[in-house]
Image (spheres, rainbow, N blue to C red):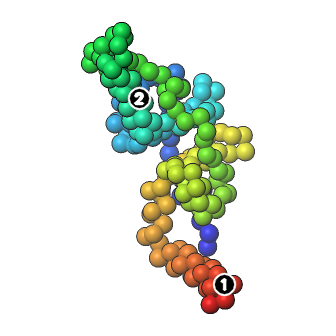
């Protein structure tokens, strides 16, 4: 039995954020909901991006790196004050740091396809959209790990892998 995205996606009211919200807003939202990333939706409810803790860390690193590099350039102002940096970081709007390329699937997409997408693109979440491109759910890497608890599903995957491996060996003349 092949699971589909609709069988394992989170369907509850998804935590979302506006592209015009700030990093301060995002920080509070992620902490309050114990999540590491969230979809970014516009005022019409359309998915326009995704933002995660990785994006935040990357941005903070860039801001700090730019600030400290000022010390190395003759004739430029010295290192920014900590308070100024904190304000600059917290007031940055989400659209400035979010990932604009969003990987989506439909509710009918097979879970194996979702897993392949995550692996290929090095992402931890894939958003599920309906025929109108409305966000209806999310499948995370953790959701895929829960499948390991289902021994029948895992047995099917292992059997399929073994068959593929056996065919590959025969093809290579072994």
Q: CA distance from mark 2 to mark 1?
A: 48 Å
* Point 67% across, 89% down: residue: 173
Q: Are marks 2 and 1 in contact (CB under 8 Å)?
A: no
Picture residue at 67% right of the left edge, 57% below the top:
108
Farthest residue to the bottom: give it. 174
Q: Position of residue 71 (x, y in %)?
A: 31, 18
Q: Position of residue 149 (x, y in %)?
A: 43, 70
- Identity of the residue drawn at 53% across and 78% down: 158
Is label 1 in a helix, a strand or a loop? loop
Residue that badge 2 annotates: 62
Quadrant of the rendered structure where residue 70 is?
top left
Within 10 angstroms of label 2, few (less than 14), some, or many (20 or more) residues? few
Residue farthest along the right direction in this orientation: 131
| On screen, residue 160 above or below 52 | below
Query: Which quadrant of the figure contains the N terminus?
Result: bottom right
Q: Is residue 157 above or below residue 146?
A: below
Percent x, y of residue 41? 57, 31
Q: Circle 1 sits on which residue?
A: 172
Question: Can you say whether 122 is above or below 7 in the image?
Answer: above
Of the image marks 2 and 1, the number of the one nearer the N terminus: 2
Q: Nearer the viewer, residue 148 or 101?
A: 101
Q: Tell me what residue is drawn at x 67 percent, y 51 percent.
A: 106
């Amino acid at each position: 039995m092949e699971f589909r995205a609709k069988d394992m996606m989170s369907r509850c009211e998804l935590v979302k954020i506006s592209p015009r919200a700030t990093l301060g807003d995002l920080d509070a939202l992620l902490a309050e909901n114990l999540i590491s990333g969230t979809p970014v939706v516009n005022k019409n409810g359309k998915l326009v991006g995704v933002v995660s803790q990785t994006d935040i860390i990357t941005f903070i690193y860039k801001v700090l790196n730019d600030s400290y590099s000022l010390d190395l350039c003759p004739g430029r102002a010295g290192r920014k004050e900590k308070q100024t940096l904190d304000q600059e970081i917290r007031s940055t709007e989400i659209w400035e740091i979010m990932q604009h390329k969003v990987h989506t699937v439909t509710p009918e997409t097979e879970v194996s396809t979702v897993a392949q997408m995550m692996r290929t693109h090095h992402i931890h979440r894939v958003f599920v959209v309906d025929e109108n491109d409305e966000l209806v759910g999310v499948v995370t890497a953790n959701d895929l790990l829960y499948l390991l608890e289902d021994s029948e599903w895992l047995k099917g995957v292992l059997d399929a892998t073994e068959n593929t491996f056996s065919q590959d060996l025969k093809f290579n003349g072994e």
